[in-house]
């Protein structure tokens, strides 16, 4: 993930040096060695800067730092120059993954310009450095205005880091505090829902169940209620959760459809809202409606507008909805269309080429799936994170077993083992496919003992009928281990109950059952 900031050059600095838009994230490029700027006058240096006001951020090490260093040396009182010089140094350190050094320069920047707000940049660097305590303190210091200005992507980037660093309880406590002091009102619907979910843990620990019940009103996604109704952590609130969810999740499902639909009506140009509305319809078992909504992107296509990531997620849902209606050939066509997108122009397509390959392999369409996974791997090498690459490795390990290509399995399993902390469920699945069942059990048992991995381990046992997003799959999973390993079943039972039959999602009950081969 390359460094991206929404606003980290002050307006005054930008105006002073002729910048009228936010700088771009650093990109790799062919650059000539920087000339010696020390012999140039300040006005000459400014002229060089103004030739391409974005070049300092595109080439921070080769151009930005040396030029701005010379500018500051010639005119140390020029605050705009000092500001951008600090930022160029941070960019340069970030591109070299020298995150501690970047954070050190950031601290100097904030000390020099305390009147300016660099929260987004600060949270980014604290997360890159896994500086959990500092990030938590910075979150606690947010007021209504500053909390509302923090981008949602950056916010969850921070929260995920805090979770990795064992700060789940602290995040839950802060979420409960925010729910009572008004800061929730500054947050997006997605932030409110996600934090309300986390605040429930704190409400239960602090025996504040009345507040826990109130928080449920902010949680509308049926997917959240799968966890709330099965994980024993939430047992004190199960009666309230059951009332809120409704039989077969009908109550919360209908509300999610209504809310996401209203949000889309209020801003039809917002493609994330478009995607959310399609997801809500699919999760509620309204597969035809999800398809009809997803197809509306064609109106934008006719106007010559480019497909955006939100459109892609809606099309992804359209494909899964076709599977749910027993029409896999139509789902194929949707995924094939997504796979035609140029990943250089649309790097987000990595999610969809991976989902396409996962679906084919999950349906036992081995040769097609292997070829699709190879395409996905090519895209993921440039645009995918470790988890994305682990999905591909897990799928290929399983597919190679079935295609008799066992000589290709070892590198896939080695990658899964090396990255099991980041892709626990995927590693377990791959190990089961290659008959390393005891190793898979050991991996899951260790995860149950690790507070930072326990929730992920629970997710490994989510059966198809409770998986509202992905399409049906015949690949083995952690649940297949339970009859053979009673110690694993006993550990799982400590943390989870089976979903009560009356709360099985109606979406699962309405799905067509695809005729897939058995894993043997």
Image: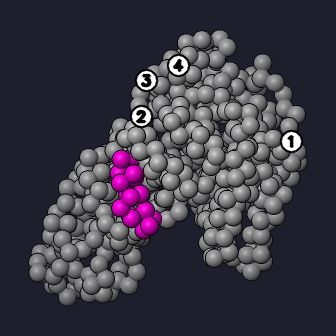
Q: Quadrant of residue 357?
A: top right
Left/right placement of residue 243 relative to residue 135 reads right
Distance from the alpha carbon under mark 1 to that under mark 3: 38 Å
Distance from the alpha carbon under mark 4 to that under mark 1: 33 Å
The mark nearer the N terminus, 2 or 1, is: 2
The mark nearer the N terminus, 4 or 1, is: 4
Front: mark 4 or 3? 4
Left/right placement of residue 135 relative to residue 320 reads left
Q: Secondary structure at mark 1?
A: loop
The mark nearer the N terminus, 4 or 3, is: 3
Within-10-Å neighbours for mark 3: few <14, some 14–19, many 20+: few
The mark nearer the N terminus, 4 or 2, is: 2
Distance from the alpha carbon under mark 3 to that under mark 2: 9 Å
Residue 452 — which label?
A: 2
Q: Which residue is mark 3?
A: 449
Q: Main secondary structure of the magenta part?
A: helix
Quadrant showing the N terminus = bottom left
Distance from the alpha carbon under mark 4 to that under mark 3: 10 Å
Q: Which residue is mark 1?
A: 512
Distance from the alpha carbon under mark 2 to that under mark 1: 36 Å
Front: mark 4 or 1? 4
Residue at 15 percent across and 84 percent down: it is: 41
Count of marks overlaid on the render: 4
Residue 119 picture location, percent across and down: 31, 64
Residue at 73 percent across and 44 percent down: it is: 247
Q: Which residue is mark 4?
A: 491
Within-10-Å neighbours for mark 2: few <14, some 14–19, many 20+: some
Q: Secondary structure at mark 3?
A: loop
Magenta stretch in the rendered image: 171-187
């Amino acid at each position: 993930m390359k460094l991206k900031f929404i606003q980290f050059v002050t307006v005054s600095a930008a105006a002073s040096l002729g910048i009228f838009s936010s700088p771009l994230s650093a990109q790799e490029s062919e650059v000539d060695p920087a000339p010696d700027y020390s012999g140039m006058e300040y006005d000459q240096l400014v002229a060089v800067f103004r030739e391409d006001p974005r070049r300092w951020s595109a080439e921070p090490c080769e151009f930005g730092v040396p030029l701005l260093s010379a500018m500051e040396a010639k005119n140390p009182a020029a605050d705009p120059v000092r500001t951008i010089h600090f930022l160029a140094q941070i960019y340069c350190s970030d591109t070299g993954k020298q995150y501690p050094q970047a954070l050190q320069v950031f601290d100097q920047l904030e000390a020099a310009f305390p009147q300016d707000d660099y929260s987004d940049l600060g949270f980014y660097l604290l997360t890159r450095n896994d500086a959990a305590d500092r990030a938590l303190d910075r979150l606690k210091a947010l007021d209504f205005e500053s909390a509302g200005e923090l981008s949602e992507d950056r916010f969850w980037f921070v929260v995920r880091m805090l979770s990795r660093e064992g700060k789940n309880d602290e995040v839950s406590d802060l979420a409960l505090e925010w729910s009572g002091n008004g800061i929730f009102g500054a947050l997006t619907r997605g932030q409110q829902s996600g934090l309300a979910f986390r605040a429930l843990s704190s409400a239960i620990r602090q025996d504040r169940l009345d507040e826990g019940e109130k928080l449920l009103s902010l949680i509308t996604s049926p997917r959240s209620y799968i966890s709330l109704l099965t994980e024993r952590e939430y047992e004190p609130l199960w009666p309230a959760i059951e009332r809120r969810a409704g039989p077969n999740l009908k109550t919360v499902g209908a509300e999610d459809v209504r809310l996401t639909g209203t949000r889309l009506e209020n801003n039809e140009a917002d493609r994330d809202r478009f995607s959310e509305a399609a997801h809500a319809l699919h999760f509620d078992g309204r597969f035809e409606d999800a398809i009809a909504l997803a197809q509306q992107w064609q109106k934008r296509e006719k106007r010559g507008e480019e497909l955006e990531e939100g459109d892609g997620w809606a099309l992804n849902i359209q494909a899964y909805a076709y599977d749910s209606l027993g029409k896999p050939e139509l789902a194929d066509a949707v995924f094939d269309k997504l796979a035609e997108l140029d990943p250089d122009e649309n790097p987000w397509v990595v999610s969809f080429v991976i989902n396409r390959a996962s679906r084919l392999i999950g349906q036992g369409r081995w040769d097609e799936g292997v070829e699709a996974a190879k395409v996905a791997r090519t895209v993921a090498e440039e645009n995918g994170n470790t988890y994305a690459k682990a999905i591909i490795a897990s799928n290929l390990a399983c597919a190679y077993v079935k295609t008799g290509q066992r000589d290709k399995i070892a590198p896939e399993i080695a990658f899964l083992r090396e990255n099991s902390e980041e892709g626990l469920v995927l590693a377990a699945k791959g190990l089961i496919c290659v008959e390393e069942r005891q190793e898979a059990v050991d991996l899951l048992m260790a995860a149950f003992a690790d507070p930072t991995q326990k929730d992920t381990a629970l997710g490994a046992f989510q059966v198809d009928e409770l998986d509202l997003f992905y399409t049906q799959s015949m690949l083995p999973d952690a649940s297949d281990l339970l009859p053979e390993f009673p110690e694993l079943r006993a550990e799982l039972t400590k943390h989870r109950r089976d979903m009560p039959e009356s709360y099985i999602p109606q979406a699962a009950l309405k799905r067509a059952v695809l005729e897939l081969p058995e894993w043997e």
